[in-house]
Amino acid sequence: MSREYEVVIGLEVHVELNTKTKIFCGCSTEFGGAPNTHVCPVCSGMPGSLPVLNREVVNKAISVGLATNCEITRNSKFDRKNYFYPDNPQNYQISQLYYPICRNGHVTISVQGKTKDVRIHEIHMEEDAGKLIHDPVTDDTYVDFNRSGVPLIEIVSEPDMRSADEVIAYLEKLRETIQYLDASDCKLNEGSMRADVNISIREMGSEEFGTRTESKNLNSFKAIRRCIEGEVKRQKDIIEGGGKVVQETRRWDDDKGTSSPMRSKEDAQDYRYFPDPDLVPIMVSDEWIEEIKASQPEFKDEKKVRYKEMYGLSDYDIDQITGSRRLGEIFEGAVAEGADPKKVANWLMVETQRLMKETNTDADKLKFSAKNLAKLVMLVDSKEINNALAKEVFEKAVFSDDIDPAKYVADNNLSIKGDSGELEAVVEKAFDANPKAVEDILNGKGKAAGAIVGFVMKEMRGKCDPAEVNRLIIEKIESMKE
């Protein structure tokens, strides 16, 4: 009879902070530069170079700690983590072992209607390594040090998660929180958020942890889920076959759906940590913490409660709008300009999301103003333009260039307000051109009116209100029945 097992998971989440310069030098942190162009003697590990701490890194690390209910370490220090690898130019990494900047926090997640706290053991600051680029054709390996020295925080959880669903919920909550703080864009595909997953299994009811493995090379939530499911099955098969799980680091290949061993799992003593002699301790005062607290934004959970009370939107609408801090800012700004909350929400959920997907634009990169979105909504309300024209105006003027929609409508002669007699004349023409449709309507086939409406819209080049067209059609049909 097969035994029942409990899965035990803890995460080490690395997040690249979006400071303009690196953690210990003035080099750019911009993603995507030509190889080895964002480097200097400090981040390339030249002898005699000295690191200088970037204060903004500490600000962002503390802000993440406060948002995840951590205690802030008042006397924090840096340590050297020694290991030898081609992308590690100094042969050590400046990190924090003994006095990390944040400790003993938690985030609350919700899975299948149940909430639980996932404890955070610590958050520490460190520098990123470079990047190895393998050429499969020549079998050569190149090193790009642009990423070396980019500031990281590592968020280390306790082993509190028991399923892939809980892991994804935890990562989504972290990403949402950090993005709201504007501490990182948390793009897994670009490596600005990376998760190492520690997985073990134990017999159901056992208090003792099993032997854990660490899985790396995970750059999407889908890959993380598949990796967890694959590693749990692998460990079960080993135990059921009478073997023992080896503590090791494994590389996940998402294309093949398999993992392979990289190296035996290291412990702290393997890195020979010692305090970094070139960096002074960080003394965090009460005033510094209060200053950061005062700058913290309203987070998603708080916004959802307030939006429900103030705007009466559905839970679905609210969840979509508060999905990013930027969407929430645009929504509130447009409503403050006088636009209807539900209509603003619809524009953000439908057309904005569609164009974001088509142009590969992230929410935090949206440039259009809340004021111009509000003007567009009110142009439709006042029947200056119809919905079809509004979509054109939004795509070409508001979303792309943030042009005043009223000016765009005027410059391009798009207003549907005009001589009502002209519209009546076109409806009359449509009746003359579609006698069969008119006969069908008179015989009770209401759908036939579509031919009349289509004719009018084409003649008017879309510059008319379909509701008004329908009203005129009904009015004319009624007069023909008399």
Image (spheres, grey):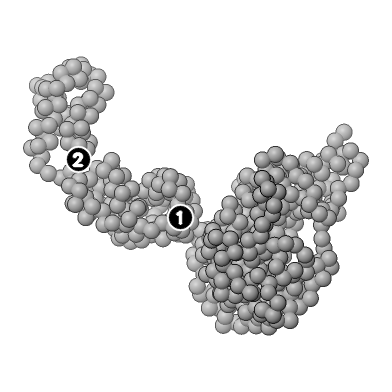
Residue 419, how many percent across, how many down?
9, 42
Residue 368, how many percent across, how many down?
35, 57
How packed mark 1 is, by other alpha carbons closer than 10 Å (few <14, some 14-19, many 20 or more), is some
Residue nearer the viewer, 41 or 186: 41
Q: Residue at x 35, y 52 (%)?
A: 399
Q: Is residue 459 above or below residue 169?
A: above
Q: What quarter of the picture does the C terminus occupy? A: top left
Query: At label 2, which amino acid type do we have?
Result: Lys
Q: Is residue 355 left or right of residue 149?
A: left
- Label 1, label 2: how many angstroms apart (C-alpha)? 32 Å
Q: How many marks?
A: 2
Q: Which quadrant holds residue 176? A: bottom right
Q: Residue at x 86, y 50 (%)?
A: 246
Q: Residue at x 15, y 26 (%)?
A: 430
Q: Is residue 277 left or right of residue 186?
A: right
Q: Residue lying furthest right in this view?
A: 242
- Look at the numbered discs 1 and 2 and tell me whether their residues touch, using CB distance below 8 Å: no
Q: Point out which mark residue 258 bears.
A: none
Residue 468, how many percent across, how many down?
18, 37
Q: Which badge, 1 or 2, is on the more N-terminal residue?
A: 1
Residue 337, how many percent across, how many down?
30, 60
Q: Point out which mark residue 363 bears.
A: 1
Q: Is residue 61 visible?
A: no
Residue nearer the viewer, 454 or 22: 22
Name the secondary structure under disc 1: helix
Residue nearer the viewer, 384 or 78: 78
Q: Point out which mark residue 463 bears.
A: 2
Q: Residue lying furthest front in this view?
A: 138
